[in-house]
Amino acid sequence: MTVVRYSRLAVLLYLATISHLPAHARTSRPVSAQPPPLIIYASVKDVGLFKTVGTSGVWQGPSPLISTALSLSTLDQAHWRTVFAGLADGLYISQDGAATWSPTGLHGHPVYAIEVDPRNVNSITVGTDRGTYHSADGGTTWSQGTSITIQLRSVVAGSAPNGLYAAGNSHVYLSTDGGAHWKGIDQGLPSRQTINALAVAPTRPYTLYAAGSLGVWQQVNGTWTALGHGLPARAYATVSVDAGHVLVCSQLDPTLYVSADGGLSWTHRPIKGLSTGIYAFAQDPSVPSTLIAGDANGNVAISSDYGVTWAVPGGAVAGTVGSPVNALAVIRRPVLPSDGVANPHRSDIAWFDHNGGHTLRDPFLSYWTSVASAPDAIGYPLTEEFNDPHYGNAPAQIFDHMELVQTADGVYPAPLGADLAPAAYVNSCQQSCAVDPTFQAFWSAHGGADVLGPPVTPAFRQSINDGTGHQYLVQYFRNTRLEFHPELSGAGDDVRAGALGTVRLLALGWI
């Protein structure tokens, strides 16, 4: 058996080589333009929190860590993986798109409304059973606003800096100092009605809309006016406003009411796919024509044309009679190198329909085609070409089993296996480590040390996160991981390269 000597120093030297590339080798080709993917979060009472990507995706959930959320909020494209959930015992935050959650510093109060300052993502104001609480440090510490002790159902940012509006019961409040102090501005509203939601006109400063149990109201320059002229006299649960539309919904019927003139006249647009009134509503701030509505039976419908047409993605979220959608939130994340692209139909570009559809072009294409059994050794592309900061911002491309990096001297496999191998096993292999007999034939037939790299660990048993919970015999090499699958021995391919490309995407936050 050939003994391959390898050390941690070799990994560091290899990384140093990659990280000092000439400028001409650092510029990657732009990723093909695609519409930013839509991510929707939905909380269903007594069922849990769900998530879907795109308008025709499948709902994931319910979340095992978050039960029913009373309110939800996302941030912006720069923080697209951050989600806030208001629960019965406080405010929680996820930094990984609702995969895991952590409590913030606000405990002991149900959170019914969340407002994050669009100018400062660390400035958060929430509405609770006893008024407002504000955090200036992203949720670590909180201070209670003065003058409000009632349950608040809505908190929204005003047009002016540090301006906020809040509503609960029959009251509406204004704060001009970021939620520290409040004053009532509900004079002129019927005292017997309940205010359910507020919205501020983005292009008309100080114009406020309120949806309540006695209709929809507009405040301009401190004066409240009831809106009618085609709007049925009933209770309204939601209101949303953009530059050209006012949108309201009622819990009494699955209809969107749209005004294009500030509330003077209204158009009725049935929300097809929903069977009851609307309990939650969200409008995409980056593409305002995209609307999301949830009903009393755990169903969610999506429109991309201001409610003219509707679709129900992946069927029902919960589909349980009597389990209403409590809250909705929406964000459009940036286009990522891992997003699939269309076939460019060019002779100098290879396109594979694996992993959502990705391209290969020189110099990565030339390297890939030069490797024997490249699909087995390297895999198919998981991304388009991009600049990887982990490897000196060099042009790179991630595949099923490894990552390729363009250096000044050409294309080489990145030391992905060495980066991801458990440190304890790497340390045991400092002086020398042999290719385990189980993996020798595959390693030799698929490029050996040149492609897969020399071994950086001995063979050991490890769970590979394939959903089975089984532990497999594995061995890490500089550029990849090999796995022994005894269940495949009859098919003659019981040794396979591991899915380290997927692990890399997870680390980047792209999946």
Image (spheres, rainbow, N blue to C red):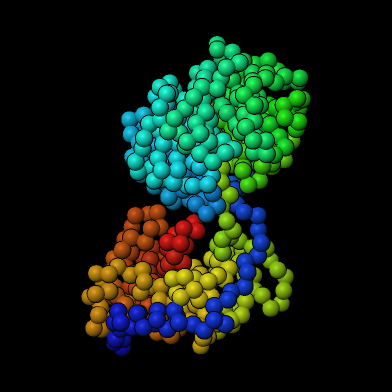
Q: Position of residue 226 (x, y in %)?
A: 67, 18
Which residue in the rendered view is the most extreme toward the top?
Answer: 192
Where residue 417 sits, quadrant-wise, is bottom left
Q: Is residue 330 left or right of residue 344?
A: left
Closer to the camera, 500 or 123? 123
Residue visible at 72% across and 26% down in the picture: 263
Q: Residue at x 64, y 63 (%)?
A: 341
Label count reads 0
Q: Residue at the location (33% across, 30% down)?
A: 108
Residue 1: where, in percent of width, then height?
Answer: 29, 87
Where is residue 235 shown, x and y percent of the image? 61, 18
Residue 473 occupies which quadrant of the picture?
bottom left
Looking at the picture, tell me which residue is in the foreground, 304 or 461.
304
**Residue 30: which quarter of the image?**
bottom right
- Residue 218 in view of the camera: yes
Q: Position of residue 7 (x, y in %)?
A: 29, 82
The answer to whether residue 467 is above or below residue 205 is below
Side of 405 where 109 appears, left or right: left
Q: Is residue 443 visible?
A: no
Q: Is residue 58 above or below residue 298?
A: below
Instruction: Say if 373 sits above or below 235 in the image.
Output: below
In the image, residue 478 above or below residue 232: below
Give the residue at x 56% y 60%.
336
